[in-house]
Amino acid sequence: MIVDPVGEGAFNAAGLRKPIYPVRAALQEHLQEHGRYVPLPLTYDDLARFDGLMPMQRPDGKDSLWSSALYRPADLEGLYPRLVEMYQLLTSDGRPIEHLRVASIDLCPYGNSQPFRIRILNQINDNHDYFYVKRADASRVYGLELEHLLSPNRINFMYQGNTLVEEHIIGVPGDAFIAAPEQYGGHLNPVRLSKEFVKFNERCFVRLLGDMRAYNFVVDVIHDLDQVQYRLRSIDFDQQSYEGRSRMYLPQFFKENLPFVQFAQRAISMESVEQYKSEERALLRKRAKLADDQLHSLLAVMKDDPIAPPEHTAQLASELAAHHGDPALARARSMGEVLNLHLARQLG
């Protein structure tokens, strides 16, 4: 319910960084079968051999979470061509794209996957794009696959060994957008923004994607004739089916998202909230049906994959059993089982 804002669920249950879970053989086979496993020209460890880091500042002069990675000139000579090749694999199936070069390599040491952000520049028109090289984490892989299958968004990523390569997701960080929405996209449409937050909130809960604080999703502003449309897109998938508390899968309960909640309270009624939630579940049913084979394969692998502490699994199974009035859920022994049963109850 969107009008019950910040409570206990606003805080990380343990206050600690989530561990990285390895991509096991069964998940790797699933990725191979569905075109996600790609022989890569370099690994995460190749990029991790930098000489130093230089903190980067935001346009307002404050420190950002990113630092420029510094390498020896001889190392850069080997890295740059392989990074361009990696970008071509991600965007054009490896077909050569002329006039591309690497403009910068940045690192965010604070994230779970400690991502490298690669800036690629087209020297003909000075247009640039980004992609990310991260430590492979099974939680994130499941999150990316579920986003691709169940959300309105398509996700492009590649995997090999300990390396995950992802495309850049365009949008304004949620916290920056809600602080000054009039700066992005001209005329603000309060009802449409609130509708999208309700639908985003429902999607996250149905597929059990946690930690969707305002800085972990972006707002994509889309102009539609004389109006403005919005889409909220997750950019952090590390907490897929990890937390034990069910509130952690509802963005409405994070204190960082309170401005979105208060905005929706003023703009739409509870009747509208229930309507939008019902609409989103209907769309999720259709997406799940269209992706039935791939989704079934993913959930079958996930059922046998230990991607959360046993106590988290037991707590979430118990809370969702109470939520659905279904004692069978309380007997689930893995996050994959919990998600499978939860999806059946939510979309059945």
Image (cartoon, helix red, strand yellow):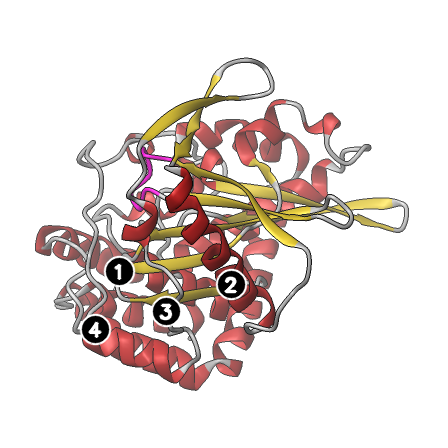
Q: Which residue is mark 2?
A: 85
Foreground mark, 4 or 2?
Answer: 2
Q: Nearer the viewer, residue 316 or 293?
A: 293
Which residues lie in the magenta part?
A: 108-114
Q: Which residue is mark 4?
A: 303
Q: Nearer the viewer, residue 316 or 49?
A: 49
Q: CA distance from mark 4 to mark 1?
A: 22 Å
Q: Secondary structure at mark 2?
A: helix
* Quarter of the view holding residue 95: bottom right
Q: Is residue 201 above or below residue 85?
A: above
Q: Is residue 28 above or below residue 318?
A: below
Which is the main secondary structure of the residues drawn in magenta? loop
Q: CA distance from mark 3 to mark 1?
A: 30 Å
Q: Which residue is mark 1?
A: 162
Q: Secondary structure at mark 1?
A: loop
Q: Which residue is mark 3?
A: 343
Q: CA distance from mark 4 to mark 3?
A: 13 Å
* Label 4 or label 3, whichever comes before in sequence order: 4
* Image coordinates for residue 34, horizontal then vertical, percent: 42, 81
Residue found at x 31% / y 51%: 46
Q: Quadrant of the C terminus?
A: bottom left
* Image coordinates for residue 282, horizontal then vertical, percent: 56, 69
Amino acid under disc 4: Lys
- Residue 281 in view: no
* Label 4 or label 2, whichever comes before in sequence order: 2
- Return the residue found at the far top: 61
Q: Is mark 4 in CB contact (under 8 Å) with mark 2?
A: no
Disc 1 packing (10 Å; few <14; some 14–19; many ≥20) = some
Q: Secondary structure at mark 4?
A: loop
